[in-house]
Image (tube, rainbow, N blue to C red):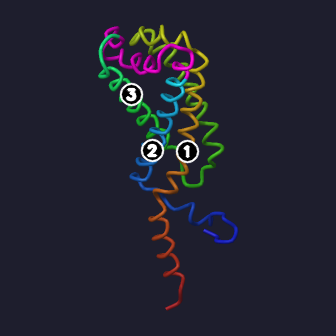
Amino acid sequence: MGAQTGSYDPRELSVRVSAGARLAAGIVAGVIGGLLLIGTMVIYANVTGAGWDTPLKALGAFVYGLESYITGPVPMLAGALIQLGFSIVVGIIFALFVSRATSVIATMIVGMLVGLAVWVAMDLAVLPFWNPTMASRMALMPIAYLAGHVLFGIGLGTTPIFVRAFSRERRSRSSRIRAAQAQPT
């Protein structure tokens, strides 16, 4: 990495990214995206008077059905874990297609498109059949639901940052090996 210019050496960007670095980057980006989505929904529900816990209880309805609205905090915890689990899976899949050289801006745009695709799939296919309770609640806040999924995509868009961060040690070691090989003996 050039110290003065702040740009990456193209040879360093071409270093192969380990599966572990991709996995870790996908997990972190997925969690960030999931937290952005949950946060958007919780804040919107609280501001509109629906109750901050409504989105989490709606997610918990995947497991508990309508009872998620009348029982204690367990359905909310289940809802948060369902959202974060799904977000991590999408984040890992997304990370499979990201390299060290991938532009963060381009990845954020693609991430937002993925977020929109997830929104459409959830709205048209998943929720009406698997969680009609959540479908009816999300129909009351469609703009926030859409905005949450766009923010989810922006969270996914952070993947190349984490791919670079988690593969930095490997890149440094590769650079040292290359430098040692380039020196005459």
Q: Nearer the viewer, mark 2 or mark 3?
A: 3
Q: Who comes first in sequence, dot 2 or dot 3?
A: 2
Contact between marks 2 and 1 (CB within 8 A): the answer is yes
Q: Tag on residue 80?
A: 3
Q: Label 1: which residue?
A: 158
Give amino acid for label 2: Val
Asked if residue 62 is among those painted magenta in the image, a careful observer would answer yes
Cα separation, mark 2 vs mark 1, equals 9 Å
In percent of width and height, residue 102 lies at 60, 50
Cα separation, mark 2 vs mark 3, equals 16 Å
Image quadrant in which you'd find residue 60: top left
Contact between marks 3 and 1 (CB within 8 A): the answer is no
Q: Who comes first in sequence, dot 3 or dot 1?
A: 3
Give amino acid for label 1: Thr
Disc 3 crowd, CA 10 A, few/some/many (<14, 14-19, 20+) = many
Q: Label 2: which residue?
A: 28
In percent of width and height, residue 45 lies at 52, 18
Disc 2 crowd, CA 10 A, few/some/many (<14, 14-19, 20+) = many
The magenta-colored residue range is: 44-69
Q: Secondary structure at mark 2?
A: helix
* 57 and 163: which is toward the camera: 57
Q: Who comes first in sequence, dot 2 or dot 1?
A: 2
Give amino acid for label 3: Ala
Q: Name the side, left or right, on which 94 lies relative to 67.
A: right
Q: Tag on residue 145?
A: none
Identify the residue shown where x is 49% and y is 39%. Answer: 32
Is the stretch drawn in magenta largely helix, strand or loop?
helix
